[in-house]
Amino acid sequence: MRVPAGPVRAGLHVLGRPVRTWCRLIFVYTESASLPGDPERPNEDWAATAVPASGQGGVLVVLDGVTPPSTDVGCVHPVPWFTARLGGALTELSGSRRDLPLPEVLAEAIRRTAESHRDTCDLSHVRTPQATVAMARWDAEAVEHLVLSDAVLLLESPGGAVRAVRDDRLDLVPPEVLRSHEATDRLRNAEGGFFTAAADPSVAGRAVAGVSPRSAVRAVAALTDGAARWVELFGEGDWADCLAVLREEGARGLLGRVRAREARDAAAGGARRWKLHDDATAVYAEL
């Protein structure tokens, strides 16, 4: 529900707890939710929304940490450590350095995060901690977006048309290659393969990024692949349907639908992916 314009409010969004933020010039409603794929393992997704101190617009950031194999990956830190630092850097830089385009924000955040563990870890290892990225930033004039790897960003127009911003390079890798860790790693952050945010700032130049007029966007959503399953794996609806669920049932509602469908699929003997559940995160912002 929209509220009248009032005093500027700002803050970081807590996962799973809807927060309404508003200012005298721009109203923003945000909601996010996240579920672990396995309650016995830490959730490797990360998400935040923020309103800059000026009250001019906002930022959303969603990361999906890449689960490493059980072998040595050259780093002493777990994936949640990495996503928290990269996500924190992205959120801070997006708000404080509005002069930097989002690809430059991503490059600087990767650089900053790499420096925080360069002395203790082998950052050249192909499986050094890494993540997929979806982010957006808006003000009174424009909405910027960026996607790297298999996260999804949805942009809804005032007329209700929904555009999915995707980096489809991972989709182009043959399924038989993805079934092998070794074969997949040969294409990871490599020319002709796919790219994730790890330790090399230059991958930011590989991201799918763009800018839309603020007047052309009324809502933004970001999904990790665990949440995007509702469309991409199970075909329960298209991206417009997905955004409608987020608006009407909230982020928790979408994730609940994903888990319910996964349970039905498992009960019917379906085994479409190598794991029944994945960490799933959704963030919705109504501008």
Image (cartoon, rainbow, N blue to C red):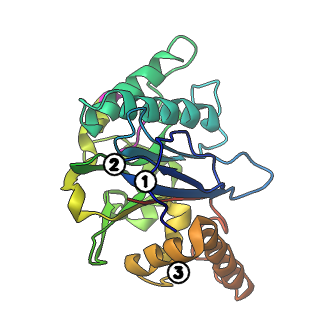
Nearest the camera: 282 or 36?
282
Q: Amino acid at mark 2?
A: Leu
Nearest the camera: 179 or 259?
259
Instruction: Count numbered badges in the picture.
Output: 3
The residue singled out by tag 3 in the image is 234
Residue sitting at x 46%, y 16%: 115
Look at the picture and state if 83 lies above or below 229: above
Find the magenta span and give its range. 194-201
User: In what element is the residue under mark 3?
Assistant: loop
Q: Do residues under tags 2 and 3 come within 8 Å of each other at their CB atoms? A: no
- Rendering coords of residue 261 (x, y %): 64, 81
User: In what element is the residue under mark 1?
Assistant: loop
Q: Amino acid at mark 3?
A: Phe
Mark 2 Cα shell of 10 Å, populated few (<14), some (14-19), many (≥20):
some
Nearest the camera: 54 or 192?
54
Residue sitting at x 55%, y 37%: 83
Q: Is residue 141 visible?
A: yes
Q: CA distance from mark 3 to mark 1?
A: 40 Å
Going by the image, does 198 lie left or right of 117? left
Quadrant of the rendered image containing residue 36: bottom right
The residue singled out by tag 1 in the image is 5
Which of the two labelled residues, at mark 3 and mark 1, occupies the earlier sequence position?
1
Q: Which mark is residue 25?
A: 2
> Which secondary structure class fits the magenta region best?
loop
